[in-house]
Image: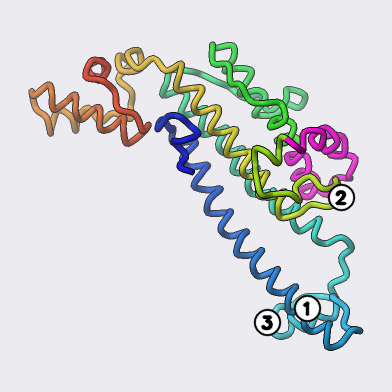
Amino acid sequence: MKRYAYRGTSFDIPANKKFWKQCGDYDSLIQFEECCYRALLERYKEEKSKDNSLSFELFTKKIAIETKVNQGFFDFDNYENSLYASYLIYPYGAFDCFIQDIIKDLKDFLINIKIDKQKGKGTKLSQLLKQLKTRGIDVKIEQFKKDLFEYYRLRRNSVAHMLPETTYISAFNKSVKSRHLVNKTYQNQPNALTSYDKMTFDDFVVCTANLKNISDIITRTIEKKINWKKIGKSHPSWINYNKINAICSFEKQKKIDFVRKVIEVRYGVKLSDELCKSFL
């Protein structure tokens, strides 16, 4: 399904475009890794069927020698759980960058937001949503998506900073209560939220889908509160006025068309002549 079909708008902002691109690139990398891992497991099954005494540890040692990877003896309990949890590190890093980038984008809409990095002030997402609301931009994100965001965030922190399971168990228990909604929204990932100590590839897929969905909801809500006339009168820096005057000279319609094209490329929307005039 095309994004427009569920978004209901072609409007987008640089921060959201960048975040989706980063997630898409990383998804491809992880999918490649997963293909390699599953192929490795299939080979192990084949070799174990011929030699039932072959342990997975000995098999990985053999593969390491074949591929010339200097690997020690592989003896890692519940390694899949740690492997899939590690996949969450990049998406949340990218989402942190999205928050920073969207604050810059909001300045272009004459909306100033500041995130407090002190502990106890809440997550960057919660602070962003709270401050947007005080400015009349009430972003409606379903509670189960917020719960899912928090669980995977804490799960990511746990693997990144070697924190105990107690860091995220309560968040998991809260999220798993809405598992039916998660499965309905992010379909074909039945193994997500299986257990707090058993992450799967489906968890990674659901995690990134939820992050992208949240960034999209924020972006679509912002569009409804944009005052294009006010922005135009501020003569934003992303409009190259020297270029307009050089190319269009004194032809007003050409200037209007130029402004419209710049806004369409940057934000995906076509403004009326009247709104474009406010930029000149």
> Which residue is located at x 31 percent, y 32 percent?
264
Main SS of residues in magenta: helix
Q: Residues within 10 Å of mark 3 (few under 14, many from 20)?
A: few
Q: Amino acid at mark 3?
A: Thr
Quadrant of the rendering where the C terminus is positioned: top left
Q: Which mark is residue 67?
A: 3
| Front label number (2 vs 3) | 2
Residue 210 on the magenta span: no
Within the image, what quadrant is residue 217 found in?
top right
Q: Amino acid at mark 1?
A: Tyr
Residue 33 spot, x, y in % from top left: 64, 64
Q: In the depicted view, which residue is nearer to us: 191 or 58?
A: 191
Question: Does the rendering let one see residue 81?
Answer: yes
Q: Which mark is residue 44?
A: 1
Q: In the depicted view, which residue is nearer to us: 183 or 155?
A: 183
Q: Is residue 201 above or below residue 21?
A: below
Residue 59 spot, x, y in % from top left: 81, 80
Alpha carbons under labels 2 and 3: distance apart: 31 Å
Q: Is residue 96 above or below residue 132?
A: below
The residue at which mark 2 appears reads as 197
Q: Which mark is residue 91?
A: none
> Which residue is located at x 24 percent, y 27 percent?
259
